[in-house]
Image (tube, rainbow, N blue to C red):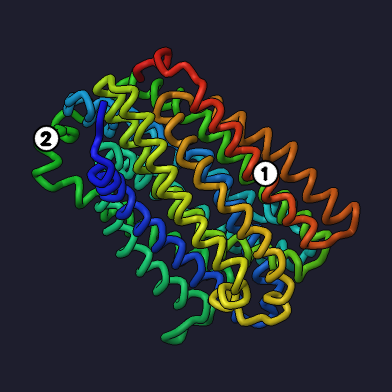
Amino acid sequence: MKLQFNKDHKYILHLALPAIAGLSTQMVVSLVDTAMVGRLYNAEYYLAAMGIGVFATWAVVSLFSSLATGTHVLIARRFGSKEYDKCGDVLNTSLIIALLIGTVIASIVVAFAFDIANFFAVDPKVGFYAGQFLHYRFMGIPFFLITVSYRGFFFGIGKTKIFMYSAILINFLNIIFNYFFIYGGFGMKGMGLAGSGLGSTLATICDALFYFTVSLLPSFRHKFNYFKNFRFIKSIASSIINISLPVSLQNIFILVGFLSFIAITGFIGTAEQAASTVIFSALQFSLMPCFGFGIAIQTLVGNSLGCEDIQKAKYYCYETSKLATAYTLLVGIIFITVPRLVLNLITNEQNVIETAAPALRIAGVGQIFYAIGVVLANGLQAAGQTLYVMLSEVIVNWFVFVPIAYFLGVFLKFGLLGAWSALPFYVILYATVIFLKFKFGNWEKYKRV
């Protein structure tokens, strides 16, 4: 099969760039939120608490947000084989699952917000602030999962621009809400870090309303018939769960791993823990675009396998990983050469900046190789290999990244620089394991889902 190089790259970017733009607006919001919190009085405590709060929220949400992956993969396959009514059946089933799970989980986790925060916090003050954030943020879980189902649907049919429009609109509202509730206004007292959690929840509700409104458009409603044939199909639910469950476990275990890393830096010092929070925020300059390329490759692989064209699916994976790596290389150069400039975008706390700068250089080296792992892992997930991807990243994260971080940072007392030195080991090993499976795996046996 002979494909046009330029044409294929344009097609990849046609899918990836809107997803990257949407994810990048989320990155900007995260950076702005961190910057707002970083300018509060006693910023070190708030930033340390925010690190725990953000990762704990991601851990809980990510346990179920992989619903997007299961929905995305199933719809991409069916869209590739032109089974449009079945795409609608997948969306309906996914939405019902999202509503049921979201309501139950939100009811449970809000009650344990402070327990979760205090488990990971070394300082009681940090734990209290993190608990306030989690209490309000967890309230938005049902609405978040509804948006997750819609994202999977629109990703699967190649309409990544809808996600971009949603992200731009909703994340703009997120900034407005967060500013108002963090600092206060119109006679209302600012809530500090808790206001960031409340503002984000209100923005999530608006996001769910946006996707529902778009789904009412005749061009989608008539083609896929999801409202006309609204129903729950057990076999589809089973397929969504079978694909999503390993991704859910992967997300939760990896985020717990990163939470453990944040906790490890807390043993080094509060300033070091705050610095790690800022570094993770800076890394989103790299990670979010990589995830955008991952979204594109799941669509491309799913559509290709729906047409039973394995070689085309593999080709797109290789080309997408090249484009993504070119981007992470550029980001790595910036992190290594001007780390303080990047950090100043996030916080004006000079102690935190000076503590974080050397570690950001190390992170800049490690993240260069992240693109290969993310893109090829998403390609394998679209081919149904979610269990392998899960085991690969969890094992490398828990048994390489976290132990090395503790050993170098705490046991050998190399401090924050030692802890962050574990990141390149983690990223390179993960990319290698994924590449070997992608290169030598038996694609002929990857079943239709």
Look at the image and tell me in which quarter the C terminus lies.
top left
What is the secondary structure assignment of the residue under circle 2? helix
Q: Which residue is mark 1?
A: 426
What is the secondary structure assignment of the residue under circle 1? helix
Residue 26 image-quadrant placement: bottom left
Q: Is residue 38 above or below residue 410?
A: below
* Alpha-carbon span between mark 1 and mark 2: 44 Å
Residue 100 is at least partly visible in this image: no
Camera-near label (1 vs 2) is 1
Say what amino acid the circle numbered 1 marks.
Answer: Tyr
Residue 314 on image: x %, y %: 38, 29
Identify which residue, 119 or 447, lies in the foreground. 447
Identify which residue, 325 or 215, lies in the foreground. 325
Residue 136 on image: x %, y %: 53, 60
Residue 257 on image: x %, y %: 68, 44
Q: How many marks?
A: 2
Q: Is residue 25 above or below residue 346?
A: above
Identify which residue, 169 or 118, lies in the foreground. 169
Q: Is residue 252 above or below residue 278?
A: above
Q: Earlier in the sequence, mark 1 or mark 2?
A: 2
Residue 7 is at least partly visible in this image: yes
Q: Is residue 73 above or below residue 204?
A: above
Farthest-out residue, right: 412
User: Along the horizontal axis of the image, is 392 left or right of 221?
Assistant: right
Query: Which disc is residue 223 wearing?
Result: 2
Residue 118 image-quadrant placement: bottom right
